[in-house]
């Protein structure tokens, strides 16, 4: 029997200039993230706020409303005790029954149910806020609600941690996680010093928090050095593929990139209806094989408010897109918000310097569109490719279109390979499309279709004129 999943309450802020529709769309996306993380969403709510900078982020009424779901007090409590004036101390021990009763009432813990009538509507084990929270804001909200509080970045990093498979992805996620955790390390044993000052030092040694944070910084440095070593290997492999035709699939998470990758290459890449199912760049050959061959790469998906540290950590992974011959911006055409998702993808690629590459827009999942909506989209995006990765005919037609595209930049040339350079014949068959082949007294005479640049490099490599 499966154990029940923990429950989560989601809350968002509607800041100035943000429409209610945008807030609801962001909450819907957060719901999918939280579901991927393993929580059942029991309630979602939002509040208009002038900014995200308040100590508790939310207003008093919203705090108490949410606390009804968690059993918390609905308030942080006094952050300091005001020192009484000397004159007031004269009356401190006065035998006043009313005053004693008032002090007793003030000292009693208050809960949200003291302010709102009716039974609590349900129970939430965690509260998740759809924005980034500072360490102090997290602590304040946890005091209000009496349960753990997560922000959007914390949710995304945790999902990345669970889905990372390769060594590089695990290192990248761990760097982002520790960068996120470092400022949120809390004192667990008071404010005692962990060690005294050394010889010639002034004052006491490091506190436990300072020591923990220094250890985190040292660990991040080690992880980055290890990642750099792996990055050198990835760069070496990428250099070997530099002369190959490469197509990179980029787009929002769950847009269907992995499904299209699987359909185009016949490879057993992971396909799952989850956010961030793919974190590692996968490179496979177009199938059936083309000559010259075309490599397809699947990359990590993007999402709104993707933490900057994650973008920075996955820069080496996203470099696969930066060095591609062609970018395919894959979107879920059945998602009404795909236009804003496409903008998120473009902005993220701008951060890694991939904004000037040739690209196509691929509207995937057209099998979910009604005829009227498809006709409207075809009019709005006349240059886009419309397909369903689940339709073999669509995939076959798209494969042919890719081949024709790259062949359009090629020319037909005669290439003579002397018998003394027989080793070059295999490379011709692998990397050039052969239109004709004859044997002459001087060697193999091929009629090939190849780009002028590739032909020039081939001749230079083998010393041919």
Image (cartoon, grey):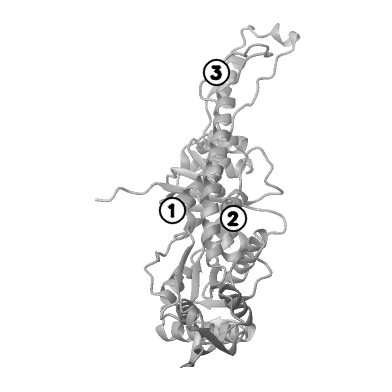
Q: Residue 194 got which mark?
A: 3
Residue drawn 67% across the image and 67% down it: 355
Q: Is residue 40 visible from the viewing direction of this image?
A: no
> Does label 3 or label 1 sit earlier along the sequence?
1
Residue drawn 57% across the image and 38% down it: 221
The 10 Å Cα crowd at callout 3, few under 14, some 14 to 19, many 20 or more, is: some
Determine the secondary structure under disc 1: loop
Q: Of discs 3 and 1, which sits in the foreground?
A: 1
Determine the secondary structure under disc 2: helix
| Image location (x, y in percent) of residue 360 | 60, 77
> Does label 2 or label 1 sit earlier along the sequence?
1
When the figure is inspected, residue 311 is found, relative to residue 445, above or below; the finding is: above
The 10 Å Cα crowd at callout 1, few under 14, some 14 to 19, many 20 or more, is: few
When the figure is inspected, residue 90 is found, relative to residue 284, above or below; the finding is: above
The 10 Å Cα crowd at callout 2, few under 14, some 14 to 19, many 20 or more, is: some
Mark 3–mark 1 Cα distance, whole angstroms, equals: 37 Å
Farthest left residue in view: 1
Q: Is residue 360 visible from the viewing direction of this image?
A: yes
> In this view of the protein, which residue sits in the foreground, 464 or 2?
464
Marks 2 and 3 close (CB-CB < 8 Å):
no
> Does label 2 or label 3 sit earlier along the sequence?
3
| Image location (x, y in percent) of residue 128 | 52, 47
When the figure is inspected, residue 16 is found, relative to residue 184, above or below; the finding is: below
Mark 2–mark 1 Cα distance, whole angstroms, equals: 15 Å
Mark 2–mark 3 Cα distance, whole angstroms, equals: 37 Å
Q: Residue 166 got which mark?
A: 1
Question: Disc 2 marks which residue?
Answer: 315
Q: Of discs 2 and 3, which sits in the foreground?
A: 2
Marks 3 and 1 close (CB-CB < 8 Å):
no
| Image location (x, y in percent) of residue 341 | 59, 66
């Amino acid at each position: 029997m499966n154990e029940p999943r923990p429950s989560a309450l989601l809350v968002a802020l509607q800041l100035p200039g943000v429409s209610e529709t945008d807030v609801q769309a962001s909450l819907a996306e957060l719901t999918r993230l939280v579901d991927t993380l393993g929580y059942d969403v029991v309630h979602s709510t939002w509040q208009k706020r002038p900014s995200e900078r308040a100590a508790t982020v939310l207003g008093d009424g919203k705090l108490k409303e949410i606390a009804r779901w968690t059993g918390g007090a609905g308030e942080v409590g006094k952050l300091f005790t005001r020192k009484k004036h000397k004159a007031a101390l004269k009356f401190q021990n006065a035998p006043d029954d009313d005053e004693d009763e008032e002090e007793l009432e003030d000292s009693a813990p208050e809960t949200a149910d003291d302010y709102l009538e009716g039974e609590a509507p349900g129970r939430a084990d965690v509260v998740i806020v759809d924005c980034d929270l500072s360490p102090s804001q997290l602590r304040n909200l946890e005091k209000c609600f009496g349960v753990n509080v997560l922000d959007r970045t914390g949710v995304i990093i945790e999902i990345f941690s669970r889905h990372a498979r390769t060594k590089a992805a695990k290192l990248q996620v761990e760097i982002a996680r520790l960068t996120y955790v470092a400022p949120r390390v809390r004192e667990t044993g008071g404010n005692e010093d962990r060690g005294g000052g050394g010889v010639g030092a002034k004052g006491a040694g490091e506190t436990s928090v300072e020591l923990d944070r220094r250890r985190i910084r040292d660990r991040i440095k080690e992880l980055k050095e290890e990642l750099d070593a792996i990055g050198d290997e990835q760069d070496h492999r990428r250099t070997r593929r530099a002369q190959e035709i490469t197509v990179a699939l980029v787009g929002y998470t769950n847009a269907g990139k992995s499904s299209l990758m699987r359909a185009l290459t016949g490879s057993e890449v992971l396909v799952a209806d989850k956010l961030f199912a793919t974190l590692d760049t996968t490179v496979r050959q177009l199938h059936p094989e083309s000559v010259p061959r075309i490599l397809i790469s699947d990359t990590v998906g993007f999402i709104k408010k993707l933490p900057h540290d994650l973008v920075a950590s996955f820069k080496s992974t996203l470099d696969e897109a930066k060095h591609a011959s062609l970018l395919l911006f894959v979107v879920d055409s059945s998602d009404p918000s795909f236009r804003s998702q496409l903008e998120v993808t473009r902005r993220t690629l701008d951060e890694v310097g991939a904004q000037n590459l040739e690209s196509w827009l691929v509207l995937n999942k057209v099998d979910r569109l009604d005829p009227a909506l498809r006709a409207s989209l075809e009019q709005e995006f006349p240059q886009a490719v419309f397909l369903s990765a689940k339709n073999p005919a669509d995939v076959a037609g798209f494969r042919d279109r890719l081949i024709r595209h790259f062949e359009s930049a090629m020319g037909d040339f005669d290439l003579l390979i002397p018998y003394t350079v027989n080793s070059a014949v295999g490379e011709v068959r692998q990397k050039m499309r052969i239109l004709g082949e004859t044997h002459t007294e001087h060697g193999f005479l091929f009629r090939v279709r190849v780009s002028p640049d590739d032909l020039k490099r081939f001749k230079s490599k083998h010393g041919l004129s």
